[in-house]
Amino acid sequence: MASEIEAAMAAKEAKLIWAEGCFLEPRQEVKIWHYSVIDCNELYEEMLKELFPDATVESREETLDGLRLELKSGDNKFGCKVESDGALIKFFGLTSELGKAVFPKEADWLTKKTGVEQSKWTFYDRMRIDGDEVYTGCIDGIQIGALSLSPVNNELQSYYGLTRSDRGNVRLNLPISVGEEAGTVNLSNGFSQEELRTTLEYDFNPDEPVITVYHSCEVCYLIHQVKGLLVPVWWVKGVRYNYETGDATGFEIVYDVETGSRYDMGGA
């Protein structure tokens, strides 16, 4: 595939490329689930003890935006913020080494705490997800997407999952637990893989100076905050290469498995 991309770039040829195995979803059906958001105000103390057992609190401030702690662990000084709405815990000011060391511990702790296994999220759009490493939950072997549908503007803007940045930030966004089943979707009766591929081919614009590479088209769960459900979607991930500028930009597209409706990314 790399040689095909290089050849198209050299020839300045607009092209659509499918990665091997892009459309290999083996499931015939997938469940819909109820979920509950866990308040981060109830989690941060336990998380702090788990990740930084020897940390001392240097200062504590409560504001309208939430709680802010200044901490010290050994020679490391860093901060912790818990947003007032309970949707975020953020550690900041960590050294890159310390952030990399605590990140897998946080994923293991969250798995045990919520019963939702954490798995690495790959090929994500860096314009939307600010992280050098991202983990999200998995249910029945199906990963939960790293964006959720906001109840405020009905767009895929709210972050979900564990993210780590080399700039020294480790974040936990919108932790959830999974409840009872809410239904089942047959993947061939709704918006099938074949229809998805046809749609993506139709949407390709050969007049743009772009080589579009689709890396994966997988069934994932979307945290649908409007419905209060984990709904199955086709989560499409890939990279666009501009043969005029040489830029490579990751992208994500999300379609409802039942209806084929495309979820709004907010125009970013």
Image (cartoon, grey):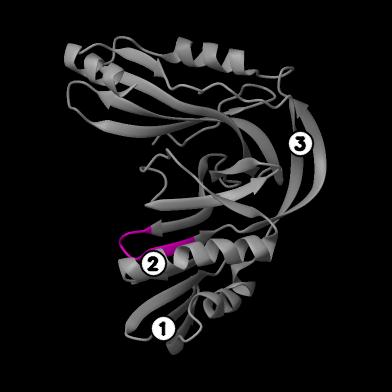
| Residue 83 falls inside the magenta stretch | no
Q: Determine the CA span between mark 2 and mark 1.
A: 14 Å
Dot 3, crowdedness within 10 Å: few (<14), some or many (≥20)? Answer: some
Q: Determine the CA span between mark 3 and mark 2.
A: 35 Å
Q: Residue at x 57, y 17 (%)?
A: 196
Type of amino acid at the residue the image marks with label 3: Lys
Q: Earlier in the sequence, mark 3 or mark 2?
A: 3
Mark 3, residue position? 31
Q: What stretch of residues is rendered in magenta?
A: 165-171
**Above or below, comparing residue 5 to residue 198 in the picture:** below
Q: At numbered mark 2, what does the secondary structure look like: helix, strand or loop?
A: helix
Type of amino acid at the residue the image marks with label 1: Leu
Dot 1, crowdedness within 10 Å: few (<14), some or many (≥20)? Answer: many
Viewer-closest of 58 and 52? 52
Q: Residue at x 51, y 23 (%)?
A: 21
| Residue 169 falls inside the magenta stretch | yes
Q: At numbered mark 1, what does the secondary structure look like: helix, strand or loop?
A: strand
**Above or below, comparing residue 51 to residue 111 in the picture:** below
Dot 2, crowdedness within 10 Å: few (<14), some or many (≥20)? Answer: many
Quadrant where the image shows the N terminus = top left
Mark 2, residue position? 99
Q: Residue at x 49, y 28 (%)?
A: 216
Q: Residue at x 61, y 50 (%)?
A: 137
Mark 1, residue position? 71
Residue 36 appears at what percent x and percent y? Answer: 71, 56
User: Left or right of 119: which side holds 90?
Assistant: left
